[in-house]
Amino acid sequence: MQDLVANKVHDEARQGEAFAPFTNDENQYNKRFYIESYGCQMNFSDSEIVASILQNEGFGATRNYEEADLVLLNTCSIREKAEQTVRKRLTEFRKIKDAKPGLLVGVLGCMAERLKSKFLEEEKLVDLVVGPDAYRTLPVLIEEAETGQKSVNVLLSREETYADISPVRLDSNGVTAFISIMRGCNNMCSFCVVPFTRGRERSRDVYSIIAEAQNLFDRGYKEVTLLGQNVDSYYWIDEANDEIVTFGKLLEKVALVSPELRVRFSTSHPKDITDEVLFTMAKYDNICNYIHLPLQSGSTRVLQLMNRTYTREWYIAKVKRIREIIPDCGISSDIIAGFCTETEDDHADTLSMMQSSAYDMSYMFFYSERPGTLAARRYKDDVPEEVKKRRLKEIVELQNRLSYQSNKQDVGKTFKVLIEGNSKKSDADWMGRNSQNKVIVFPKENYNYKKGDYAFVRVNDFTQATLIGEAVKE
Ligand code: SAM
Ligand code: SF4
Protein backbone atom coordinates (compact mmCIF):
# COMPACT_ATOMS: atom_id res chain seq x y z
CA MET A 1 0.00 0.00 0.00
CA GLN A 2 2.72 2.39 0.94
CA ASP A 3 4.40 1.82 -2.41
CA LEU A 4 1.18 2.38 -4.22
CA VAL A 5 0.78 5.67 -2.42
CA ALA A 6 4.42 6.56 -2.87
CA ASN A 7 3.93 6.25 -6.62
CA LYS A 8 1.18 8.81 -6.45
CA VAL A 9 3.34 11.42 -4.84
CA HIS A 10 5.52 13.10 -7.42
CA ASP A 11 7.84 14.49 -4.74
CA GLU A 12 8.39 10.94 -3.57
CA ALA A 13 9.96 10.09 -6.89
CA ARG A 14 12.77 12.45 -5.88
CA GLN A 15 13.28 11.13 -2.35
CA GLY A 16 16.96 10.66 -1.67
CA GLU A 17 17.93 12.32 -4.92
CA ALA A 18 21.63 13.12 -4.99
CA PHE A 19 22.56 16.62 -5.89
CA ALA A 20 25.49 17.51 -8.13
CA PRO A 21 25.03 20.90 -9.68
CA PHE A 22 28.54 21.48 -10.86
CA THR A 23 28.96 18.82 -13.53
CA ASN A 24 30.42 21.44 -15.87
CA ASP A 25 32.04 23.47 -13.13
CA GLU A 26 35.62 24.38 -14.02
CA ASN A 27 36.55 25.50 -10.52
CA GLN A 28 39.12 23.49 -8.66
CA TYR A 29 37.92 22.19 -5.33
CA ASN A 30 40.03 20.45 -2.77
CA LYS A 31 37.00 19.05 -0.94
CA ARG A 32 33.82 17.43 -2.10
CA PHE A 33 30.35 17.27 -0.60
CA TYR A 34 27.53 14.90 -1.34
CA ILE A 35 23.93 15.82 -0.44
CA GLU A 36 20.71 13.83 -0.57
CA SER A 37 17.31 15.43 -0.05
CA TYR A 38 14.11 14.00 1.40
CA GLY A 39 10.62 15.37 1.95
CA CYS A 40 8.90 18.40 0.49
CA GLN A 41 10.05 20.85 -2.19
CA MET A 42 11.18 23.26 0.54
CA ASN A 43 13.90 20.79 1.47
CA PHE A 44 15.05 20.41 -2.12
CA SER A 45 15.11 24.18 -2.39
CA ASP A 46 17.06 24.44 0.89
CA SER A 47 19.65 21.98 -0.44
CA GLU A 48 20.33 24.48 -3.24
CA ILE A 49 21.02 27.14 -0.59
CA VAL A 50 23.30 24.74 1.29
CA ALA A 51 25.12 23.98 -1.99
CA SER A 52 25.67 27.69 -2.53
CA ILE A 53 27.06 28.16 1.00
CA LEU A 54 29.39 25.17 0.60
CA GLN A 55 30.55 26.24 -2.83
CA ASN A 56 31.70 29.55 -1.32
CA GLU A 57 33.68 27.54 1.19
CA GLY A 58 35.55 25.67 -1.55
CA PHE A 59 33.48 22.50 -1.56
CA GLY A 60 32.58 21.02 -4.93
CA ALA A 61 29.57 18.74 -5.30
CA THR A 62 29.79 15.10 -6.22
CA ARG A 63 27.18 12.53 -7.12
CA ASN A 64 29.43 9.79 -5.80
CA TYR A 65 29.39 9.68 -2.00
CA GLU A 66 32.46 7.47 -1.97
CA GLU A 67 34.62 10.37 -3.12
CA ALA A 68 33.00 12.89 -0.71
CA ASP A 69 34.65 14.48 2.34
CA LEU A 70 31.26 15.59 3.62
CA VAL A 71 28.02 13.63 3.30
CA LEU A 72 24.78 15.50 4.08
CA LEU A 73 21.23 14.23 4.38
CA ASN A 74 18.54 16.92 4.24
CA THR A 75 15.78 15.19 6.15
CA CYS A 76 12.01 15.15 6.62
CA SER A 77 9.92 14.44 9.73
CA ILE A 78 6.43 14.74 8.31
CA ARG A 79 5.60 11.05 8.76
CA GLU A 80 7.29 8.30 10.70
CA LYS A 81 8.15 6.47 7.49
CA ALA A 82 10.13 9.49 6.25
CA GLU A 83 12.29 9.32 9.38
CA GLN A 84 12.75 5.55 9.08
CA THR A 85 14.00 5.98 5.51
CA VAL A 86 16.71 8.37 6.69
CA ARG A 87 17.74 6.11 9.61
CA LYS A 88 18.12 3.23 7.20
CA ARG A 89 20.14 5.34 4.81
CA LEU A 90 22.47 6.40 7.62
CA THR A 91 23.35 2.78 8.36
CA GLU A 92 24.59 2.49 4.77
CA PHE A 93 27.01 5.38 5.32
CA ARG A 94 28.50 3.61 8.34
CA LYS A 95 30.50 1.29 6.04
CA ILE A 96 31.95 4.20 4.08
CA LYS A 97 32.86 6.05 7.23
CA ASP A 98 34.67 2.99 8.56
CA ALA A 99 36.70 2.86 5.35
CA LYS A 100 37.36 6.64 5.35
CA PRO A 101 37.74 7.87 8.95
CA GLY A 102 38.02 11.62 8.09
CA LEU A 103 34.62 11.62 6.39
CA LEU A 104 32.04 13.91 8.02
CA VAL A 105 28.37 12.96 8.06
CA GLY A 106 25.78 15.70 8.67
CA VAL A 107 22.04 15.62 9.19
CA LEU A 108 20.15 18.74 8.08
CA GLY A 109 16.51 19.80 8.03
CA CYS A 110 13.44 18.78 9.98
CA MET A 111 14.76 15.61 11.65
CA ALA A 112 17.79 17.56 12.86
CA GLU A 113 15.46 20.18 14.31
CA ARG A 114 13.09 17.67 15.89
CA LEU A 115 15.72 15.48 17.53
CA LYS A 116 18.47 18.07 18.13
CA SER A 117 21.53 16.76 20.00
CA LYS A 118 19.60 13.56 20.78
CA PHE A 119 20.44 12.63 17.23
CA LEU A 120 24.13 12.43 18.10
CA GLU A 121 23.39 9.95 20.89
CA GLU A 122 21.08 7.88 18.73
CA GLU A 123 23.19 7.86 15.59
CA LYS A 124 26.81 7.68 16.64
CA LEU A 125 28.21 8.15 13.15
CA VAL A 126 26.67 11.62 12.75
CA ASP A 127 29.11 14.53 13.20
CA LEU A 128 26.88 17.51 12.39
CA VAL A 129 23.25 18.29 13.22
CA VAL A 130 21.97 21.47 11.56
CA GLY A 131 18.41 22.84 11.63
CA PRO A 132 16.72 24.61 8.67
CA ASP A 133 17.46 28.13 9.93
CA ALA A 134 21.14 27.51 10.73
CA TYR A 135 22.69 26.79 7.33
CA ARG A 136 24.74 29.99 7.33
CA THR A 137 26.73 28.54 10.22
CA LEU A 138 27.65 25.40 8.28
CA PRO A 139 31.24 26.56 7.55
CA VAL A 140 31.95 27.08 11.27
CA LEU A 141 30.25 23.83 12.22
CA ILE A 142 32.22 21.89 9.61
CA GLU A 143 35.46 23.42 10.91
CA GLU A 144 34.52 22.37 14.43
CA ALA A 145 33.61 18.86 13.32
CA GLU A 146 36.93 18.55 11.47
CA THR A 147 38.67 18.82 14.84
CA GLY A 148 36.75 15.77 16.02
CA GLN A 149 34.02 17.60 17.96
CA LYS A 150 30.36 16.93 17.32
CA SER A 151 28.61 20.11 16.09
CA VAL A 152 25.00 21.13 16.54
CA ASN A 153 23.06 24.25 15.60
CA VAL A 154 19.31 23.96 15.63
CA LEU A 155 18.40 27.53 16.55
CA LEU A 156 15.22 28.64 14.83
CA SER A 157 15.01 32.22 13.67
CA ARG A 158 12.22 34.75 13.26
CA GLU A 159 14.05 36.54 10.45
CA GLU A 160 16.14 34.12 8.41
CA THR A 161 14.91 33.81 4.80
CA TYR A 162 18.32 33.32 3.08
CA ALA A 163 17.13 36.16 0.81
CA ASP A 164 20.66 37.19 -0.18
CA ILE A 165 21.91 33.70 -0.98
CA SER A 166 21.70 32.82 -4.62
CA PRO A 167 20.78 29.11 -4.74
CA VAL A 168 22.94 26.84 -6.87
CA ARG A 169 20.44 25.13 -9.17
CA LEU A 170 20.09 21.42 -9.35
CA ASP A 171 21.22 20.44 -12.85
CA SER A 172 17.83 18.95 -13.67
CA ASN A 173 16.20 20.39 -16.76
CA GLY A 174 17.26 24.06 -16.94
CA VAL A 175 13.64 24.98 -17.66
CA THR A 176 11.78 24.91 -14.32
CA ALA A 177 12.99 26.11 -10.91
CA PHE A 178 11.70 26.69 -7.39
CA ILE A 179 11.86 30.01 -5.56
CA SER A 180 11.35 29.97 -1.83
CA ILE A 181 9.22 33.01 -0.86
CA MET A 182 8.68 32.34 2.82
CA ARG A 183 9.73 29.99 5.60
CA GLY A 184 8.02 28.39 8.59
CA CYS A 185 4.33 28.13 9.36
CA ASN A 186 2.01 29.68 11.94
CA ASN A 187 -0.96 27.45 11.31
CA MET A 188 -0.60 24.72 13.89
CA CYS A 189 -2.64 22.05 12.15
CA SER A 190 -2.83 19.52 14.96
CA PHE A 191 -1.31 16.60 12.99
CA CYS A 192 1.65 18.54 11.65
CA VAL A 193 5.23 18.76 12.85
CA VAL A 194 6.25 21.58 10.48
CA PRO A 195 5.58 24.53 12.85
CA PHE A 196 7.94 22.84 15.34
CA THR A 197 10.69 21.94 12.87
CA ARG A 198 10.60 25.04 10.69
CA GLY A 199 9.54 27.68 13.16
CA ARG A 200 7.48 30.85 12.79
CA GLU A 201 6.30 32.08 9.45
CA ARG A 202 8.34 34.83 7.79
CA SER A 203 8.16 36.29 4.30
CA ARG A 204 11.13 37.01 2.11
CA ASP A 205 12.03 40.45 0.73
CA VAL A 206 10.00 40.96 -2.44
CA TYR A 207 12.91 42.52 -4.34
CA SER A 208 15.11 39.47 -3.80
CA ILE A 209 12.30 37.23 -5.09
CA ILE A 210 11.83 39.29 -8.26
CA ALA A 211 15.60 39.45 -8.78
CA GLU A 212 15.83 35.66 -8.50
CA ALA A 213 12.97 35.18 -10.97
CA GLN A 214 14.57 37.67 -13.41
CA ASN A 215 17.95 35.99 -13.07
CA LEU A 216 16.45 32.57 -13.78
CA PHE A 217 14.62 33.92 -16.83
CA ASP A 218 17.80 35.58 -18.12
CA ARG A 219 19.52 32.19 -17.82
CA GLY A 220 16.88 30.48 -19.96
CA TYR A 221 14.50 29.16 -17.32
CA LYS A 222 10.85 29.34 -18.39
CA GLU A 223 8.95 28.44 -15.25
CA VAL A 224 9.22 29.31 -11.57
CA THR A 225 7.25 27.83 -8.69
CA LEU A 226 6.88 30.10 -5.68
CA LEU A 227 7.28 27.93 -2.60
CA GLY A 228 6.03 28.19 0.96
CA GLN A 229 4.06 26.11 3.45
CA ASN A 230 1.21 28.59 3.11
CA VAL A 231 1.98 30.97 0.25
CA ASP A 232 -1.31 32.86 0.53
CA SER A 233 -0.26 34.37 3.81
CA TYR A 234 2.82 35.98 2.20
CA TYR A 235 3.03 39.49 3.61
CA TRP A 236 5.88 41.94 3.18
CA ILE A 237 5.97 45.65 3.89
CA ASP A 238 7.84 47.66 1.27
CA GLU A 239 8.69 50.67 3.38
CA ALA A 240 10.50 52.48 0.55
CA ASN A 241 7.33 52.55 -1.56
CA ASP A 242 4.84 52.50 1.29
CA GLU A 243 3.28 49.33 -0.10
CA ILE A 244 1.96 46.20 1.55
CA VAL A 245 2.86 43.28 -0.69
CA THR A 246 0.28 40.51 -0.39
CA PHE A 247 0.60 37.18 -2.18
CA GLY A 248 -1.68 38.47 -4.97
CA LYS A 249 0.63 41.45 -5.50
CA LEU A 250 3.75 39.27 -5.40
CA LEU A 251 2.23 36.94 -7.96
CA GLU A 252 1.57 39.88 -10.26
CA LYS A 253 5.11 41.23 -9.88
CA VAL A 254 6.62 37.85 -10.74
CA ALA A 255 4.23 37.44 -13.69
CA LEU A 256 5.42 40.81 -15.02
CA VAL A 257 9.05 39.60 -15.22
CA SER A 258 8.12 38.28 -18.68
CA PRO A 259 5.01 36.88 -20.34
CA GLU A 260 7.31 34.01 -21.42
CA LEU A 261 7.99 33.03 -17.82
CA ARG A 262 5.38 30.72 -16.34
CA VAL A 263 4.52 31.16 -12.69
CA ARG A 264 3.23 28.47 -10.33
CA PHE A 265 2.91 28.36 -6.57
CA SER A 266 2.50 25.87 -3.76
CA THR A 267 0.92 25.38 -1.24
CA SER A 268 -2.37 27.22 -0.69
CA HIS A 269 -4.33 26.93 2.53
CA PRO A 270 -8.08 27.00 1.76
CA LYS A 271 -8.68 29.56 4.51
CA ASP A 272 -6.18 32.03 3.05
CA ILE A 273 -6.51 31.95 -0.73
CA THR A 274 -8.20 35.22 -1.67
CA ASP A 275 -10.21 36.58 -4.59
CA GLU A 276 -7.26 38.91 -5.19
CA VAL A 277 -5.10 35.87 -5.93
CA LEU A 278 -7.76 34.25 -8.11
CA PHE A 279 -8.36 37.42 -10.15
CA THR A 280 -4.61 37.90 -10.59
CA MET A 281 -4.36 34.33 -11.87
CA ALA A 282 -7.21 34.99 -14.30
CA LYS A 283 -5.61 38.25 -15.48
CA TYR A 284 -2.20 36.88 -16.49
CA ASP A 285 -1.87 34.09 -19.05
CA ASN A 286 1.55 33.15 -17.71
CA ILE A 287 0.24 32.41 -14.19
CA CYS A 288 -0.67 28.75 -14.43
CA ASN A 289 -4.25 27.70 -13.85
CA TYR A 290 -3.48 25.22 -11.16
CA ILE A 291 -4.04 25.30 -7.40
CA HIS A 292 -2.91 22.76 -4.84
CA LEU A 293 -5.61 23.14 -2.19
CA PRO A 294 -5.17 20.47 0.51
CA LEU A 295 -8.45 19.24 1.95
CA GLN A 296 -7.04 16.80 4.58
CA SER A 297 -10.54 15.60 5.54
CA GLY A 298 -14.06 16.07 4.22
CA SER A 299 -15.65 15.94 7.67
CA THR A 300 -16.19 19.22 9.49
CA ARG A 301 -15.83 17.45 12.82
CA VAL A 302 -12.44 16.01 11.87
CA LEU A 303 -11.33 19.30 10.30
CA GLN A 304 -12.03 20.94 13.62
CA LEU A 305 -9.89 18.40 15.46
CA MET A 306 -7.20 18.97 12.85
CA ASN A 307 -7.40 22.71 13.58
CA ARG A 308 -7.75 23.47 9.88
CA THR A 309 -10.10 26.41 10.67
CA TYR A 310 -12.49 25.77 7.74
CA THR A 311 -15.57 23.62 7.40
CA ARG A 312 -16.70 21.28 4.67
CA GLU A 313 -19.10 23.98 3.43
CA TRP A 314 -16.37 26.63 3.40
CA TYR A 315 -14.15 24.37 1.30
CA ILE A 316 -16.99 23.60 -1.15
CA ALA A 317 -17.63 27.35 -1.54
CA LYS A 318 -13.91 27.96 -2.16
CA VAL A 319 -13.74 25.37 -4.93
CA LYS A 320 -16.89 26.88 -6.46
CA ARG A 321 -15.31 30.33 -6.36
CA ILE A 322 -12.12 29.06 -8.02
CA ARG A 323 -14.13 27.47 -10.82
CA GLU A 324 -16.22 30.66 -11.26
CA ILE A 325 -13.16 32.89 -11.66
CA ILE A 326 -10.86 30.39 -13.43
CA PRO A 327 -13.16 27.88 -15.15
CA ASP A 328 -10.36 25.64 -16.46
CA CYS A 329 -8.34 25.60 -13.22
CA GLY A 330 -6.65 22.32 -12.25
CA ILE A 331 -7.12 21.50 -8.57
CA SER A 332 -5.21 18.96 -6.52
CA SER A 333 -5.30 18.03 -2.86
CA ASP A 334 -3.64 16.38 0.13
CA ILE A 335 -5.76 13.89 2.06
CA ILE A 336 -5.14 12.13 5.34
CA ALA A 337 -6.92 8.83 6.07
CA GLY A 338 -7.61 7.67 9.62
CA PHE A 339 -6.96 10.76 11.72
CA CYS A 340 -7.80 10.38 15.43
CA THR A 341 -11.48 9.45 16.07
CA GLU A 342 -12.30 9.29 12.34
CA THR A 343 -15.47 7.21 11.82
CA GLU A 344 -16.77 5.49 8.70
CA ASP A 345 -19.15 8.44 8.25
CA ASP A 346 -16.26 10.91 8.43
CA HIS A 347 -14.40 8.81 5.86
CA ALA A 348 -17.50 8.79 3.62
CA ASP A 349 -17.52 12.60 3.91
CA THR A 350 -13.94 12.68 2.64
CA LEU A 351 -14.83 10.48 -0.34
CA SER A 352 -17.85 12.61 -1.21
CA MET A 353 -15.79 15.81 -0.98
CA MET A 354 -13.18 14.35 -3.32
CA GLN A 355 -15.95 13.60 -5.75
CA SER A 356 -17.53 17.04 -5.53
CA SER A 357 -14.16 18.79 -5.84
CA ALA A 358 -13.24 16.53 -8.81
CA TYR A 359 -9.53 16.67 -8.06
CA ASP A 360 -7.19 16.12 -10.98
CA MET A 361 -4.65 14.61 -8.61
CA SER A 362 -4.09 14.09 -4.88
CA TYR A 363 -1.29 13.25 -2.49
CA MET A 364 -2.76 10.70 -0.09
CA PHE A 365 -1.46 9.50 3.25
CA PHE A 366 -2.60 7.62 6.28
CA TYR A 367 -2.27 9.45 9.56
CA SER A 368 1.09 9.08 11.25
CA GLU A 369 1.28 10.42 14.80
CA ARG A 370 4.22 12.80 15.27
CA PRO A 371 5.64 13.33 18.76
CA GLY A 372 5.09 16.81 20.17
CA THR A 373 2.27 17.80 17.82
CA LEU A 374 -1.06 19.04 19.20
CA ALA A 375 -2.79 15.84 18.07
CA ALA A 376 -0.20 13.63 19.78
CA ARG A 377 -0.72 15.56 23.00
CA ARG A 378 -4.52 15.86 22.85
CA TYR A 379 -5.97 12.90 20.99
CA LYS A 380 -5.58 9.17 20.89
CA ASP A 381 -4.32 7.69 17.63
CA ASP A 382 -7.25 5.28 17.80
CA VAL A 383 -8.00 4.21 14.23
CA PRO A 384 -6.46 0.73 13.80
CA GLU A 385 -3.73 0.50 11.19
CA GLU A 386 -5.65 -1.93 8.97
CA VAL A 387 -8.64 0.45 8.98
CA LYS A 388 -6.39 3.41 8.07
CA LYS A 389 -4.92 1.39 5.22
CA ARG A 390 -8.27 0.21 3.93
CA ARG A 391 -9.63 3.76 3.97
CA LEU A 392 -6.51 5.02 2.23
CA LYS A 393 -6.91 2.34 -0.42
CA GLU A 394 -10.48 3.53 -1.05
CA ILE A 395 -9.27 7.12 -1.28
CA VAL A 396 -6.52 6.15 -3.75
CA GLU A 397 -8.95 4.12 -5.85
CA LEU A 398 -11.41 7.01 -5.99
CA GLN A 399 -8.65 9.44 -6.93
CA ASN A 400 -7.55 7.08 -9.70
CA ARG A 401 -11.07 7.18 -11.10
CA LEU A 402 -11.23 10.98 -10.78
CA SER A 403 -7.85 11.38 -12.51
CA TYR A 404 -9.00 9.06 -15.29
CA GLN A 405 -12.19 11.11 -15.74
CA SER A 406 -10.27 14.36 -15.69
CA ASN A 407 -7.81 13.13 -18.34
CA LYS A 408 -10.60 11.70 -20.48
CA GLN A 409 -12.24 15.12 -20.61
CA ASP A 410 -9.04 16.55 -22.08
CA VAL A 411 -9.11 14.33 -25.18
CA GLY A 412 -9.62 16.52 -28.24
CA LYS A 413 -8.46 19.70 -26.45
CA THR A 414 -5.34 21.64 -27.43
CA PHE A 415 -2.99 22.91 -24.71
CA LYS A 416 0.00 25.21 -24.62
CA VAL A 417 2.78 22.99 -23.30
CA LEU A 418 6.15 23.99 -21.90
CA ILE A 419 8.68 21.37 -23.05
CA GLU A 420 10.78 20.15 -20.10
CA GLY A 421 12.82 17.49 -21.91
CA ASN A 422 12.66 14.04 -23.47
CA SER A 423 9.90 11.74 -22.39
CA LYS A 424 11.08 9.11 -19.91
CA LYS A 425 10.04 6.29 -22.23
CA SER A 426 11.43 7.49 -25.55
CA ASP A 427 13.90 10.08 -26.85
CA ALA A 428 11.65 10.37 -29.89
CA ASP A 429 9.00 12.08 -27.71
CA TRP A 430 8.93 15.36 -25.80
CA MET A 431 7.58 15.64 -22.27
CA GLY A 432 6.04 18.87 -20.98
CA ARG A 433 3.23 20.26 -18.86
CA ASN A 434 0.14 22.27 -19.59
CA SER A 435 -1.01 25.18 -17.44
CA GLN A 436 -3.03 22.77 -15.26
CA ASN A 437 0.21 20.94 -14.40
CA LYS A 438 -0.67 17.79 -16.33
CA VAL A 439 2.16 15.91 -17.99
CA ILE A 440 1.79 15.66 -21.78
CA VAL A 441 3.99 13.59 -24.09
CA PHE A 442 4.05 14.00 -27.86
CA PRO A 443 6.26 12.93 -30.79
CA LYS A 444 9.07 15.27 -31.81
CA GLU A 445 8.43 14.60 -35.51
CA ASN A 446 7.46 17.42 -37.94
CA TYR A 447 8.36 20.28 -35.60
CA ASN A 448 11.73 21.65 -34.68
CA TYR A 449 11.14 22.28 -31.00
CA LYS A 450 13.77 22.30 -28.31
CA LYS A 451 13.70 22.00 -24.53
CA GLY A 452 12.23 25.18 -23.00
CA ASP A 453 10.01 25.97 -26.02
CA TYR A 454 6.25 26.29 -25.85
CA ALA A 455 4.30 24.00 -28.17
CA PHE A 456 0.60 23.60 -28.88
CA VAL A 457 -0.40 20.00 -28.39
CA ARG A 458 -3.70 18.32 -29.16
CA VAL A 459 -4.57 15.47 -26.82
CA ASN A 460 -5.48 12.21 -28.57
CA ASP A 461 -5.16 9.68 -25.79
CA PHE A 462 -4.24 9.34 -22.11
CA THR A 463 -3.17 7.09 -19.30
CA GLN A 464 -4.05 7.69 -15.66
CA ALA A 465 -1.04 9.95 -15.15
CA THR A 466 -0.21 11.27 -18.62
CA LEU A 467 -1.89 12.91 -21.58
CA ILE A 468 -0.69 11.76 -25.00
CA GLY A 469 -0.93 14.07 -27.97
CA GLU A 470 0.55 15.56 -31.11
CA ALA A 471 1.95 18.99 -31.82
CA VAL A 472 -0.31 21.24 -33.91
CA LYS A 473 0.09 24.69 -35.42
CA GLU A 474 -0.88 27.59 -33.13
N1 SAM B 1 1.80 23.35 4.20
C1 SAM B 1 1.20 22.47 3.32
C2 SAM B 1 -0.28 22.37 3.65
O1 SAM B 1 -0.75 22.86 4.62
O2 SAM B 1 -0.97 21.78 2.84
C3 SAM B 1 1.88 21.12 3.27
C4 SAM B 1 2.36 20.54 4.52
S1 SAM B 1 2.98 18.91 4.58
C5 SAM B 1 4.63 19.07 4.06
C6 SAM B 1 2.26 18.05 3.26
C7 SAM B 1 1.14 17.14 3.65
O3 SAM B 1 1.58 16.11 4.50
C8 SAM B 1 0.00 17.78 4.42
O4 SAM B 1 -0.84 18.54 3.62
C9 SAM B 1 -0.68 16.56 5.01
O5 SAM B 1 -1.63 16.03 4.12
C10 SAM B 1 0.45 15.57 5.15
N2 SAM B 1 0.78 15.36 6.57
C11 SAM B 1 1.27 16.26 7.44
N3 SAM B 1 1.40 15.69 8.67
C12 SAM B 1 0.98 14.42 8.55
C13 SAM B 1 0.86 13.33 9.47
N4 SAM B 1 1.18 13.48 10.73
N5 SAM B 1 0.39 12.15 9.01
C14 SAM B 1 0.04 12.00 7.70
N6 SAM B 1 0.15 12.99 6.80
C15 SAM B 1 0.59 14.19 7.22
FE1 SF4 C 1 1.57 21.84 8.55
FE2 SF4 C 1 -0.82 23.01 8.50
FE3 SF4 C 1 1.41 24.50 8.35
FE4 SF4 C 1 0.70 22.94 6.29
S1 SF4 C 1 -0.46 24.69 7.08
S2 SF4 C 1 2.74 23.14 7.20
S3 SF4 C 1 -0.19 21.18 7.31
S4 SF4 C 1 0.76 23.28 10.09
Image (cartoon, rainbow, N blue to C red):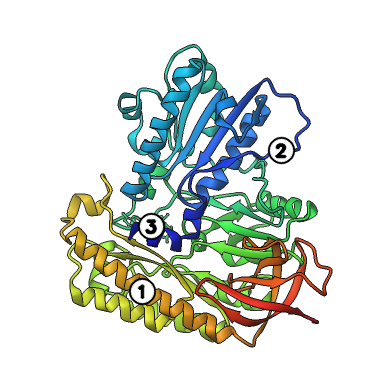
> Residue tagged by mark 2?
23
Name the foreground residue: 358 vs 285.
358
> Residue tagged by mark 3?
3
Q: Which disc, if any, is residue 397?
A: 1
Kindly report which numbered mark, 2 or 3, lies closer to the viewer in this rendering: 3
Q: CA distance from mark 2 to mark 1?
A: 41 Å
Name the foreground residue: 102 vs 350.
102
Between discs 2 and 3, the one toward the N terminus = 3
Res 140 → quadrant: top right
Q: x and y percent of residue 451 in the render?
A: 76, 61
Residue at point 34% right, 29% down? Answer: 119
Per the image, label 2 sits on a secondary structure element best described as: loop
Residue at point 65% right, 40% down? Answer: 164
Which image quadrant shows ligand 1? bottom left
Mark 2 neighbour density, 10 Å: few (under 14) some (14–19) many (20 or more): few
* 318 left or right, relative to 304: right
* Amino acid type of the residue that numbered disc 3 sits on in the rendered structure: Asp
Asked if disc 3 and disc 1 are in contact, CB closer than 8 Å, the reply is no
Q: CA distance from mark 2 to mark 3?
A: 32 Å
- Quadrant of the rendering where the N terminus is positioned: bottom left
* Amino acid type of the residue that numbered disc 2 sits on in the rendered structure: Thr
Q: CA distance from mark 3 to mark 1?
A: 14 Å
Residue at point 40% right, 74% down? Answer: 399
Name the foreground residue: 36 vs 168.
36
* Amino acid type of the residue that numbered disc 1 sits on in the rendered structure: Glu
* 105 left or right, relative to 368: right
Mark 1 neighbour density, 10 Å: few (under 14) some (14–19) many (20 or more): few
Residue 199's place in the image compared with 454, above or below, is above
Mark 3 neighbour density, 10 Å: few (under 14) some (14–19) many (20 or more): few
- Quadrant of the rendering where the C terminus is positioned: bottom right
- Say if disc 3 is inside 8 Å of ligand 1: no
* 331 left or right, relative to 313: right
